[in-house]
Amino acid sequence: MTPLRRTLSKLPLLQPCARVVRFSAAADGEAPAPAATAVPAEASSESSPPIDAGSSIRKPISLWPGMYFSPVTNALWEARSKMFEEAGDAGASGKAASPESELVPRSPSRSRTSIFYKFSGDYVLREQYRNPWNKIRMGKLVEDLDALAGTICYKHCSSDDGTTRPLLLVTASVDRMVLKRPIRIDTDLQIAGAVTWVGRSSMEIQLEVTQSTEETRDSSDSVALTANFTFVACDSRTRKSTPVNPISPETEREKLLWQEAENRNKMRKNKREERNRDAKVEDLSRLQALLAEGRVFCDMPALADRDSILIRDTCFENSLICQPQQRNIHGRIFGGFLMRRAFELAFSTTYAFAGVAPRFVEVDHVDFLRPVDVGNFLRLKCCVLYTELDNPAEPLINVEVVAHVMQPELRSSEVSNKFYFTFTVRPEALNDGLRIRKVVPSTEEEARRVLERMDAESCHTSS
């Protein structure tokens, strides 16, 4: 049996990933052939056999969902499926997975994985990631980031001898995803990442999107986006949290990333403790100040500031029934799909608010509070929570998306996810006289949500 390490070693290489995403049609279940090696039709003496429309169903059932997502997500899930297959073979041969007491520390380099997008030459691939303005479709890229982070977690938890414990690794949160510079759709792109911090059952993964252009000679300048994902390991049978392999940073860079992640986790714990305390007097005064202008809108609308707008007047929403094609390899709705839907709703809401196509700045935070299953009735509610107008050259628009899982038969609705995004508008629009309005709450509940996000942002800035 091929060792697990040999299987995993294929992922970090750039060319195999390019081969995966650059493909031509194949017949009768054959593997897709690289576009670069395809024989031109005029040079072939025989006509090609007809394409079997049902050939794809001969894939393992666990890989069917990947066919409905991007080729990158599909490739990552196929590689992850091989880990499960080899673990199953090892169990059949009598090998036992390592018990929790024998969890061996792993270096970040062991889980490091990268994937390559050859946008410069693969027009089919480029078309899947192009938005209406001929720029990168960020929602699709966010979807791939979640899939890559999950694969990195599996590599960290897998064993060298082809065995692995029955783990279910789920996205718990996205702490920060910052766009450092615009991403081009016609230039090759690479995403790379590794596990940088490990708790008892949680892991933090840092991902970097890099894109080299003529303007970015230095490798540090080629980093276009950074993201921090947190995954939690659960036992696949009991669904309870379970310990994972500790991490052992080796290089100075790995130690620095570990320390940064440690500080973030301490800050999150402190914030949770603060939420459990009674509201302070100064928080109440801030709350009243936020509500003052909203009360004018509600009680004396004719006298309200025309450069302001109520939160409730910025809202948009959409609903969907979660389909089997949107599930991940564990049978639940793919977290990357939820992030993409939330991002695209936030983008649309900001577009309607600003009057021009917005520019993405960052994902501030994402919480995965409960799993979403196939067949769930999902409702996404979006609003502009507040704006930051201190810098006239770059006004910031902070957007909230809340996902609710509804069960009409039980007359129940439960929050499954919370997403927070920041957008701005392009300088050309501001030069043409565009003005971004101030957004104000009209209820105490809205004001508390605004204060919570403002405090979270100030913590990020100070750290």
Image: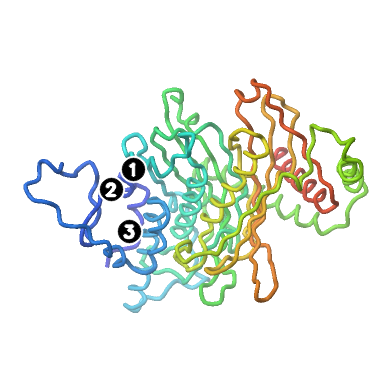
Total marks placed: 3
SS for tag 2?
A: loop
The residue wearing badge 3 is: 7
Seen in the image, is 349 located left or right of residue 385?
A: left
Which three-letter amino acid code belongs to the residue tagged 1? Val
Residue 98: image quadrant is: bottom left
Tell us which disc is closer to us: 1 or 2.
1
Tell us which disc is closer to us: 2 or 3.
2
Seen in the image, is 16 located left or right of residue 265?
A: left
Most distant residue in the front direction: 302
In 3D space, how far apart are the residues under numbered discs 2 and 3 (Cα atoms)? 21 Å
Tell us which disc is closer to us: 1 or 3.
1
**Residue at x-position 65% and y-position 76%:** 409
How is the structure coloured here?
Answer: rainbow
The residue wearing badge 2 is: 23
The residue wearing badge 1 is: 124
Q: Residues within 10 Å of mark 1 (few under 14, many from 20)?
A: few
Q: Report if the CB atoms under discs 1 and 2 are less than 8 Å apart.
A: yes
Closer-to-camera residue (113/312): 312
Rendering coords of residue 246 (x, y %): 54, 59
Most distant residue in the left direction: 45
